[in-house]
Image: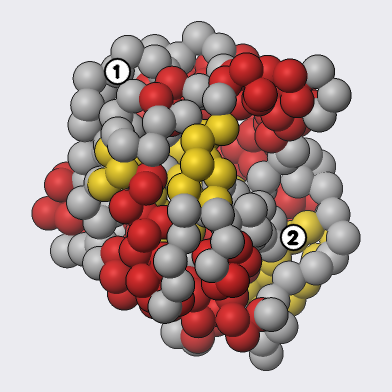
Amino acid sequence: MNHHVVIGAGPVGSGVAVALAERGTPVTVITRSGSGPEHPLVTRVQADASDAAAITKAATTAAAIYNCANPPYHRWPTDWPPIHTALMTAAERTDAVLVMMDNLYAFGPGTTMPMAEGDTPNATGPKGAVRRRMADELLHAHASGRLRATLARASDFYGPGVIGAALGERVLPRVLSGKSVSLLGSLDVVHAVSYMPDVVRTLVTIADDEQAWGKPWHVPNAPAITQRKTVAALAAAAGTTVAVKSVPKVAVTALGLFVAPMRGLTETWYQFTDPWVADSSLTQQTFGLVATPLADGAAATVAWWRARS
């Protein structure tokens, strides 16, 4: 059991695979297209994440399976359950630790801030509810002895490799060119963001450490600031000045009539109008992990986008 299996090759999956490979761990990356990072210790396999038999075969001697899949935003209620079930089945059959990349959606609107690992998730909307059920099923399966599992929750991603996110391709190219940026909801309430290398580091850490299993953990984030100030930090790293505008909810609702992913944003609108902060003190105290300062993360993010351009 000296290799790990990563499901998905987005920024999280690729980041985890590279981090493991660079420390000398063989990795199998599974995607529907057979894509993934190139590294001598990375093997890319074409398979569907909802195919329990295929995942089981790839993970037969694995120490851990990382669920870094990312179904289309508007298809979470239909696409997540079969993937989640298949990965739990594979973990049960192989005894590999199942490590799930999670988010904060399960807490739902009205949750007391900051959100802590032990708080009770209460989301009822389609996307929040499916994430809540997934976490509940995973932790209950671990508690019953069916399998070994853990999960890490992160907020909105930013950083090298992050493209299809709120602080991805809609923001960074405009920051680099000094053009105005449009963001959802309020620009002046605190909203935590998660730096991709910190996300990766947390996942790899909880996969290896037995004291993490059976519990949820929060990725350490830099102190939460407003969306306006986050963009200002990115602009400062880029040496530009950027005006920030707010996209009204009515515009998102109207776009949702024609663009399926936009419809999902109405469910999570509260995340951008109310404070949205996660408490990661337990993760930091338990594993010694610390968040990357925003200025450092912004500089690395800008450098990655410039190199990509």
How crowded is the residue under tag 2: few (<14 C-alpha within 10 Å), some, or many (20+)? many
Q: Which colour scheme is used?
A: secondary structure
Q: Position of residue 250 (x, y in %)?
A: 62, 17
- Residue 9 appears in the picture as rendered: yes
Side of 154 relative to 190 (left or right): right
Q: Position of residue 249 (x, y in %)?
A: 57, 21
Q: Could you say which disc has been placed on residue 111 in the image?
A: 1
Residue nearer the viewer, 222 or 146: 222
Q: Where is residue 209 in the image (x, y as percent from the top left)?
A: 30, 59
Give the amino acid type for the residue marked by disc 2 in the picture. Answer: Ile
Q: Give the quarter of the image for residue 77.
A: top right
Mark sitting earlier along the chain (2/1): 2
Side of 294 relative to 125 (left or right): left
Side of 90 relative to 215 (left or right): right
Q: What element carries label 1?
A: loop
Q: Relative to 139, say whether 285 is above or below.
A: below
Residue shown at the point (31%, 37%) measured from the top left: 188
Quadrant placement of the C terminus: bottom right
Q: Where is residue 74 in the image (x, y as percent from the top left)?
A: 73, 28
Q: Is mark 2 on a helix, strand or loop?
A: strand
Residue shown at the point (37%, 48%) measured from the top left: 228
Give the amino acid type for the residue marked by disc 1 in the picture. Answer: Thr
Q: Could you give the CA–CA distance between mark 2 and mark 1, rounded to whole angstroms?
A: 35 Å
Q: Relative to 81, say whether 204 is above or below.
A: below
From the image, tell me which residue sits under label 2. 30
